[in-house]
């Protein structure tokens, strides 16, 4: 067994070079001729005259994971020895190493007896095991530093300004490998090769792995990934592309449609990957897709007939314009936003939840500009019983809660980490977090607060004249400050939130427009330019940055008109592509060379079942004939919606919506009593067809139009008519059986 | 709203009405069952080609996951000599094995300590829930840093791999997760057919039924069969067979087949019928959700299900640890002890592996809120059955429970032990749909002390 395992490992290393086996990849010397190292480049410490703390030692603590979250970087440290997470606080770290523990961590008289060295090399028991090999370069650096009396880097020494990785963009052949080089730039303009003291990490090892020494190893598969190099608290990215083998002739690309700006940018990306797009989807597929993705319902039989019969060359444009006027538009998009904003009625009360929901719906119905929507929400004042948007501040009561949700929802920036420590992948620290939180420090609340599980009372939200946020460690009172850029001054007596909203929802704030553009793009295209949709950061780059920027710019240009953004995307050829892959895009799941299939959203599928069967669903706390999209809280019971993955408000933390198919869903559609009754109901569509004067052919045509939004093919029609002609058949039963069968196929439950 | 929920439950209970009709249904279905048997056989033969077929004593594994990271101090690794801010409020108690002590609420397990084994020396470096769950549930660390609340998957889980390697029988899914999916308990690249079947309903309720696994009222078997045939005739959406395209319709197809197998399985219906257990047995397991889920798991093992995860939330005791433990530990202690005894009485313990664990242990120093925080340097894992030598204590933490120091083991060793017990070669290579090879476990060495 063991031999086999070893042999397999060897095979794996030689063929695929996984990161775990990377030590056996021969180290490749950083190349110098081709551009990178400048003449000023210094060597990395070993031969430099003096070894000092900030410049040489602190980077090692990061490189070897000493100050990482699970080890000494944990807020309480490890076994009494605490370091700042990833070295964001040099004073703290120096103090901890040199002064605390009665100075035993460092002994300049005999460096090798220093705890720092003994623990790191495992000669004393160390929870973290052996981190540094005896005699290695890091060992020598540590010894020299301690022997020299553990000097700090002089305060007037050049400061680290930025870190760059060479090359920043790499296009590799499958299996190709080469060494990255990391360079630090200092305030005096000097440069230094810090590859040895950097930590590396690939976002996707299957595309390209990276060894601890920074050697990049392309995998066998086409794709892209970001590889991160971390030196101290700076991060640089190398974006790696592994195109499909064999180039595509430029003429082939030239002939593809690119008049629409979205298509031109999608194509730019495909060219880099040597990929080709799929063919265009046919009219009926486009029609059904547009209904489901723009307004969240199936087209009716009549609507489909009309569209398919229409010979006008611009009928798709006309269709989109019509769809954006449909009443379902507002409910469908509000239902998506309700996932993000909607509070738990047990927490804020039923009436408040209802009001909030109504405000969100109204905003989408009247196509309120998105900046206006966010400004109204953020600066809301008034009664939770009359002004729905104020409920956000009834639901989220503390400045820190509001900070995390506002930054994540509207800027795609996850500040949660910076609440307790410096954000490990971002530039944000605790003062950034709490200065931002200070915008929410002066929100007054009057009336009856939260008294779960009823919480039924009214509360008033107003501008308070007192209230501050303090830094959790220094206790310093923090002035409100945005997490980047400049915000307007806050006038005497003005609500701090006004200034915040001006800054946040400004056309100058690229995060604001791009986050919404990415959300809408994701809903329409099935996969986000950035995934997760609300996690925009340098270390999680978009799959097509130029496209995201163009969509964001466009959105700003249109004065944040959501319908225009939708129209812009939906009228591109990329949106209208077939899902059918071809050899040059089979592997693509994120570059939009084809359309990606998705299961219908829970509410949309349930509404479709109702529309097809003609039997309404009955919801508690809703008017008769209400649609699932119109529910004002996820607490309204529905086994169907639960099975199909709507967010579960009973879980703590609440579960996010899931879009994956499951066995439970399949069983529910097949067997649930509720759906069985909808098909067989005397008042339903199947019964109506059964007793109608229509011919079987007419029934079958209508049924295909109703369920698949297309006509049956000739052979499909023949098969269906065959079952109506069997002897002794009961028309209604046959109709029910056919309806059940069509509804239980993926062509019904998926958006193609 | 609450009233409505109750009504829905009541309504739900009417659509499963006994076994007789389903047995009829099954008789007509030899082809379908035949097909799944063939699949099973071909799976097995593929497995043996790749050298995967080792003999292991266990047919099944019941994995009890205490989500949040259960404390090692207050369960199986008490530290009476530690200073009080580490030692905590509980005292050690003697167990059936001389010299081995558990914490004071583990009374019933202490009484059968000679039948179980505790591994006290697994440690790793993933101190948050998302990452810790991934490491212990898959035997592989997360590839990139993940957040605390993350549900991530970079590698197939123990349960999914078992389903993939062992196949399913009797129409029952090979992998159950009860009452919910665990964070990293999914199939990853193995594909949707190896995802767990989730039973959210509470078997402690009188009205307990596994929903939608039987035909709706008034639909005869023949007619259902006719519909099913008709469905396959009209189903004309093209499928993208290359797995790399990520076509979600392939998963839907797989689920349709699984649903059908489940509906037509007499064994499945029997296993779900927990009401047929004698009251006395149900009492022994504990008349609470966890107790009855454990009993359900035992019934599933009897029906041939190879992997069941019982996913129990609420073990993240950053505050008020002692009071919560006083309440919850006796329940877990009783149920797990009963499960092990019951399996033994039925002669099933030798072929059933029982594991109890969470993502990590908890910090030595009790924090200001009378809780303990996340701590991946030490944890205790209970393993029993599957010919694991009873009474074995593997490894040790230091005198104050800070860190595993003796016989330090990794999550990889743990995962390899589970696989070896189930007859699965942890050293084998699996292939992703893109053709990339992936070691099942990067270090395939099992915990030798448990392999005797």
Image (cartoon, coloured by chain):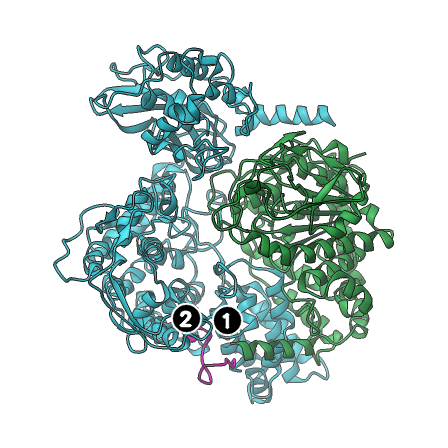
Chain colours: A cyan, B green
Q: Main secondary structure of the magenta part?
A: loop
The Cα–Cα distance between marks 1 and 2, rounded to whole angstroms, is: 9 Å
Badges 1 and 2: C-beta atoms under 8 Å apart?
A: yes
Q: Which residue is mark 2?
A: A308
At which x and y percent is residue A464? 22, 64
Residue B34 on the magenta segment: no
* Part of the protein shown in magenta: A617-632
A507, A283: nearer the viewer = A507
Q: Do we see residue A325 in this rendering?
A: no
> Does residue B240 appear left or right of residue A276 in this picture?
right
Residue B256 picture quarter: bottom right
Q: Secondary structure at mark 1?
A: loop
Q: Secondary structure at mark 2?
A: helix
How crowded pointer 1 is (Cα within 10 Å; few <14, some 14-19, many 20+) is rated as many
A437, B167: nearer the viewer = A437
**Residue A711 bears which disc, if any?**
1
């Amino acid at each position: 067994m063991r031999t086999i395992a070893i042999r397999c490992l060897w095979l794996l290393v030689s063929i695929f070079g996984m990161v775990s086996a990377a030590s056996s990849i021969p180290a490749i010397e950083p190349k110098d001729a081709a551009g990178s190292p400048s003449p000023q480049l210094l060597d990395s410490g070993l031969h430099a005259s003096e070894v000092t703390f900030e410049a040489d030692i602190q980077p090692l603590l990061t490189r070897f994971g000493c100050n990482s979250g699970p080890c000494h970087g944990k807020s309480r440290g490890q076994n009494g020895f605490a370091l700042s997470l990833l070295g964001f606080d040099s004073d703290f770290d120096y103090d901890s190493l040199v002064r605390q523990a009665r100075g035993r961590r460092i002994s300049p008289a005999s460096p090798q007896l220093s705890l720092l060295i003994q623990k790191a090399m495992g000669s004393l028991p160390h929870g973290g095991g052996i981190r540094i090999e005896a005699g290695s370069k890091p060992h020598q650096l540590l010894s020299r530093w301690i022997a020299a009396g553990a000097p700090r880097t002089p305060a007037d020494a050049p400061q680290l300004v930025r870190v760059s990785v060479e090359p920043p963009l790499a296009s590799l052949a499958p299996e190709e490998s080469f060494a990255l080089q990391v360079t630090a730039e200092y305030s005096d303009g000097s440069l230094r090769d810090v590859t040895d003291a950097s930590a590396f990490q690939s976002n996707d090892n299957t595309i390209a792995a990276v060894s601890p020494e920074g050697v990049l190893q392309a995998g066998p598969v086409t794709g892209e990934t970001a590889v991160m190099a971390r030196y101290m608290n700076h991060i640089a990215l190398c974006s790696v592309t592994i195109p499909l083998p064999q180039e595509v002739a430029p003429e082939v690309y030239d002939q593809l449609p690119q008049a629409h700006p979205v298509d031109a940018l999608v194509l730019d990306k495909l060219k880099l990957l040597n990929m080709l797009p799929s063919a265009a989807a046919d009219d009926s597929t486009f029609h059904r897709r547009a209904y489901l993705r723009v307004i969240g319902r199936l087209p009716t039989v009549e609507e489909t007939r009309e569209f398919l019969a229409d010979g006008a060359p611009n009928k798709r444009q006309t269709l989109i314009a019509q769809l954006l006027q449909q009443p379902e538009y507002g409910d469908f998009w509000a239902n998506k936003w309700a996932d993000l904003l909607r509070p738990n009625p047990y927490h804020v009360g039923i009436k408040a939840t209802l009001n909030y929901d109504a405000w969100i719906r109204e905003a989408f119905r009247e196509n309120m500009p998105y900046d206006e929507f966010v400004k109204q929400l953020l600066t809301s004042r008034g009664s939770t019983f009359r002004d729905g948007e104020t409920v956000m501040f009834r639901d989220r009561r503390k400045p820190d809660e509001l900070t995390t949700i506002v930054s994540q929802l509207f800027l795609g920036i996850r500040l949660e980490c910076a609440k307790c420590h410096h954000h490990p992948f971002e530039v944000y620290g605790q003062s950034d977090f709490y200065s931002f939180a200070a915008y929410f420090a002066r929100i007054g609340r009057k009336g009856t607060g939260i008294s779960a599980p009823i919480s039924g009372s009214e509360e008033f939200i107003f501008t308070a004249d007192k209230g501050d946020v303090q830094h959790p460690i220094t206790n310093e009172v923090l002035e409100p400050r945005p997490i980047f850029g400049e915000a307007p001054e806050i006038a005497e007596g003005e609500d701090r939130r006004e200034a915040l909203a001006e800054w946040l929802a400004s056309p100058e704030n690229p995060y604001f427009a791009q986050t919404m553009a990415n959300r809408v793009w994701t809903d329409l295209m099935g996969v986000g330019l950035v995934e997760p949709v609300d996690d925009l950061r340098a270390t999680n780059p978009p799959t097509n940055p130029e496209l995201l920027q163009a969509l964001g710019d466009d959105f700003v240009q249109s004065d944040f008109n959501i319908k225009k953004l939708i129209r812009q995307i939906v009228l591109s050829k990329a949106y209208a592509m077939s899902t059918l892959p071809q050899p040059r895009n089979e592997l693509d799941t994120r570059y939009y060379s084809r359309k990606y299939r998705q299961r219908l959203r829970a509410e949309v599928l349930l509404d479709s079942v109702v529309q097809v069967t003609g039997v309404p669903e009955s919801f508690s706390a809703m008017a008769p004939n209400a649609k699932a999209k119109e529910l004002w809280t996820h607490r309204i019971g529905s086994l169907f919606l639960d099975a199909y993955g709507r967010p579960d408000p009973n879980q703590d933390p609440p579960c996010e919506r899931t879009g994956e198919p499951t066995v439970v869903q399949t069983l529910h559609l097949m067997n649930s009593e509720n759906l069985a009754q909808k098909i067989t109901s005397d008042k339903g569509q199947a019964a109506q067809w059964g007793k109608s004067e229509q011919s079987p052919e007419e029934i079958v045509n209508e049924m295909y139009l109703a369920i698949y939004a297309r006509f049956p093919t000739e052979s499909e029609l023949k098969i269906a008519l065959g079952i109506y002609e069997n002897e002794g058949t009961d028309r209604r039963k046959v109709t029910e059986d056919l309806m059940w069968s069509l509804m239980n196929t993926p062509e019904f439950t998926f958006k193609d | 709203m609450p009233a409505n929920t109750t009504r829905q439950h009541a309504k739900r209970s009417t659509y499963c009405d006994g076994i007789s009709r389903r047995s009829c249904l099954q008789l007509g279905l030899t082809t379908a069952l035949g097909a799944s048997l063939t699949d099973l056989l071909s799976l097995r033969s593929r497995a043996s080609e790749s050298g995967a077929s080792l003999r292991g004593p266990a047919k099944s594994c019941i994995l009890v996951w205490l989500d949040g990271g259960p404390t090692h101090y207050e369960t199986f690794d008490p530290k009476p000599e530690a200073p009080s801010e580490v030692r905590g409020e509980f005292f050690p108690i003697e167990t059936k094995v001389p010299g081995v002590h558990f914490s004071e609420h583990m009374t019933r397990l202490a009484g059968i300590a000679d039948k179980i084994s505790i591994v006290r020396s697994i440690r790793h470096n993933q101190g948050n829930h998302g990452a810790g769950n991934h490491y212990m549930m898959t035997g592989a660390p997360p590839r990139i840093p993940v957040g605390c609340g993350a549900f991530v998957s970079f590698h197939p889980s123990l349960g999914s791999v078992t389903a993939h390697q062992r196949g399913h029988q009797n129409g029952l899914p090979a992998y159950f997760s009860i009452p919910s999916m665990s964070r990293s308990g999914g199939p990853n690249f193995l594909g949707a057919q190896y995802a767990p079947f989730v039973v959210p309903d509470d078997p402690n309720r009188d009205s307990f039924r596994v929903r939608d696994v039987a035909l709706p009222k008034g639909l005869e078997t023949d007619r259902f069969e006719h519909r099913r045939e008709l469905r396959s005739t009209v189903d004309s959406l093209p499928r993208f067979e290359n797995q790399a395209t990520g076509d979600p319709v392939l998963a839907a197809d797989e689920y349709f087949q699984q649903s059908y197998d489940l509906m037509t399985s007499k064994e499945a219906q029997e296993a779900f019928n927990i009401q047929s257990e004698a009251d006395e047995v149900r009492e022994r397991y504990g008349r609470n959700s966890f107790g009855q889920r454990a009993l359900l798991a035992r019934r599933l093992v009897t029906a041939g299900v190879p992997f069941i995860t019982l996913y129990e939330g609420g073990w993240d005791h950053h505050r008020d640890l002692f009071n919560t433990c006083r309440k919850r530990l006796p329940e877990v202690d009783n149920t797990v002890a009963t499960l092990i005894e019951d399996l033994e009485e039925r002669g099933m313990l030798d072929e059933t592996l029982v594991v109890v664990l969470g993502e990590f242990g908890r910090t030595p120093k009790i924090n200001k809120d009378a809780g303990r925080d996340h701590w991946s340097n030490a944890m205790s894992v209970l393993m029993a059955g599957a010919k694991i030598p009873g009474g074995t204590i593997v490894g040790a933490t230091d005198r104050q429970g800070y860190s595993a120091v003796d016989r330090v083991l990794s999550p990889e060793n743990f995962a390899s032990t589970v696989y070896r017990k189930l007859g699965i070669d942890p050293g084998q290579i699996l292939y992703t749909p893109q053709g990339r090879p992936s070691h099942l476990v990067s270090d395939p060495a099992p915990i030798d002390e448990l392999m005797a």
